[in-house]
Amino acid sequence: MDLSRVTFLTLAALATVSAFRVVTASKIMHAALWLGFTFLMVAGVFLTMGAEFLAAAQVLIYVGAVTTIILFGIMLSEAAEVRGGRDPVAPTTPKGPAIIRRFILPIVATLAFAAIMIFVYSQAPWPDASAAPAGDTVRLLGSALFTDYVVPFELAAVLLLVALVGAIAIAVRDDHKEEQG
Amino acid sequence: MPLDGDVGLLLPEIIVTLAAVVALATGLRPQAGRAPAVWAFLGVTAAALLLLIGEGRGQAVEIWSGTVLVDGFARLFKLVFLVIAGLTVLVAADYVRRRGIPPGEFYLLLLLATVGMMFMAGSLNLLTIYLGLECLSLASYSLSGLLRRDARSTEAALKYILIGAISSGTILFGMSLVFGATGSLHLGEVSQAVSSATGMTPVLLAGMMFLVVGLGVKMAAVPFHMWAPDVYDGAPAPVAAFLITGSEAAAFAAALRIFLVGLPSLRAEWTAVFVTLAVITMTFGNISAIVQTRIRRLLAYSAVAQAGYVMVGLAIASDAAVSAMLYYLIAYAFTTIGAFTVVILLARHQPADEIQDFRGLGQRAPLFALALTIFMLSFIGIPPTAGFFGKFYLFQAAVGAGMPWLAVIMVINGIISIPYYWGVVRTMYLSEAEDRSPLEAPWGLRWATVIGLGATLVLGLFPDALVRVVNAIQVVPGLPIAF
């Protein structure tokens, strides 16, 4: 096993573990920090596969902007349970059938899924990974985005507009406009 | 690198996008009045007219380096989406004002959701299809939660976004497996690569299953329907009608393209999966609908059941089945929007969540009660309504494909569905209302009902015209891979 394979597996394992911590952390602040760490590990995975531009974009946008905004959102929130301290849904020890539902069933499902996917991946005659495009990946990406993929690119812009307007429409505060009926 | 950039064939999408932005801008003024609704309606109408009379009819061309495909299939689906959006605007005009929904944002999200659906039907490129789907999904999540003081609406939006995000991830995983196995995002090249590659079948099968699950969520197929009753019940009523008809039709359009064009070599596998899903979906939907007492939950489970019928067409996937499916989707869209219009009308005057609230509607609003009766007949599939021919063609396709037992299951399901649809009609005519004052209807609701009723009856009495149109539709475009 060569070094790049070891690096890849280490980064991927770290990303998986920290992603798991995002959903299991009891404080939302910790979850947000784990999320940032996950993004960083994914950027590392991109680097090991020769996608330098994607890795840089991942660090700048996800680690830099997205995580920071989530942290701001948490700190500016007025709801006490969001800002930390108490856990609104106190963890309880499940009993009886709940043990099956909350522990055994998810574990069995996960293991079965992992087994199927490993089988599927190991069966396939994957092509050699030597076909990485030579030269300047940023230039290649840029020209692909603005020539072959210009319609999906514009559609992504529409998608961002939808996300922006949708988020504002749901989150905006309207004190004076009362709904009737 | 030269571009075969043809803007003319993209004009309908561009017009709808522009109309959405104009509707948002006019909605920003404090006294917006009707302006956003009018702009939205004008944009949708202009785009639909352009599709009907514009250039490039009757041919299949792939433009923008194969990221957009314009053919009969895409054009018909785009037209259906635009009609659905137009009817939704008519229905919503009064609703939005009365419930204090911000009009600019509402129409922008509605129209951009329509743009997303148009790209889902109008491409053979998985990237474009996925972006269209995300456009539709994100708009649907926020549209569902626009009644912010209504706990049901918030619950609907939250459930929808959580389950929808997982389904998007699933679709993306499936697409990435297909891409990994074939090295292309273009469905035409995918199918060529599949037929020449050996040993990739397990990966493709896994990708296919992910795609089935992800699209199944959008179609509200059992067992991926958990979000549907809550969303169709809790979202603003026009949005629910839009999602049941438009979002579902878009998911079926994308599924037809992905499975028939991209993965025809796995046909035996996906047919088996879809037949199973179809039977479970229609049976579960119909049986759950029987016990509902809330009208919109009844319509929600009925929508799940109808998705099961449509899926029969997807499972068989013969030419006849695809035509039947298109017919059914179109007929069902008019019927559903019509039925929702009557529900919205009643809810204008009183809290009308329960089926019991329809008591005496036959006296209070005879025209609307009659219309709802015909819509219910169409849901059951009784002639001379559009729903009858929709089901009839699906039976025919099932028998023609050598699956008569599937037709039998559909008939049994039709019989199961009679009591709950008929219960609504009985309540309207045979129970006395406490409040007998006649209902006033704003013009938007009136027109939407008339159009829904007219289309349901015309498609039921003269099905031949539409049958000719849908029979001419080819899911697999006969064009060479252009690059």
Image (cartoon, coloured by chain):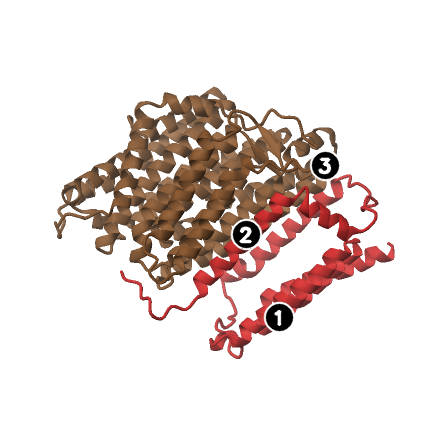
The numbered mark 1 sits on a residue in which chain?
A
Res A25 quadrant in image = bottom right
The colour applied to the residues of chain A in this rendering is: red
Left or right: B38 as drawn, with respect to A63: left
The numbered mark 2 sits on a residue in which chain?
A
At x 65%, y 68%, the residue is A34
Q: Which residue is mark 2?
A: A159
Under mark 1, the amino acid is Thr
Tell me, yes or no, if residue A27 can be seen here: no
Under mark 2, the amino acid is Leu
Q: Position of residue B323 (x, y in %)?
A: 46, 26
Q: Residues within 10 Å of mark 3 (few under 14, many from 20)?
A: many
Q: Which chain is brown?
A: B
Q: Say what secondary structure mark 3 lies in.
A: loop
Q: Please state, as top left, top right, bottom left or bottom right, where the C terminus of chain A lies in the image.
A: bottom left
Tell me, yes or no, if residue B51 can be seen here: yes
- Of badges 3 and 1, the one in the foreground is 1
Q: Say what secondary structure mark 1 lies in.
A: helix
Under mark 3, the amino acid is Met
Q: Please state, as top left, top right, bottom left or bottom right, where the N terminus of chain A lies in the image.
A: bottom right
Q: Position of residue B103 (x, y in %)?
A: 37, 56
- Of badges 3 and 2, the one in the foreground is 2
Determine which of the numbered discs, if any, sits on residue A68 in the image: 1
Answer above or below: position of B451 versus B463: below
At x 46%, y 22%, the residue is B471
Determine which of the numbered discs, if any, sits on residue B200 in the image: 3
Q: Position of residue B376 (x, y in %)?
A: 28, 37
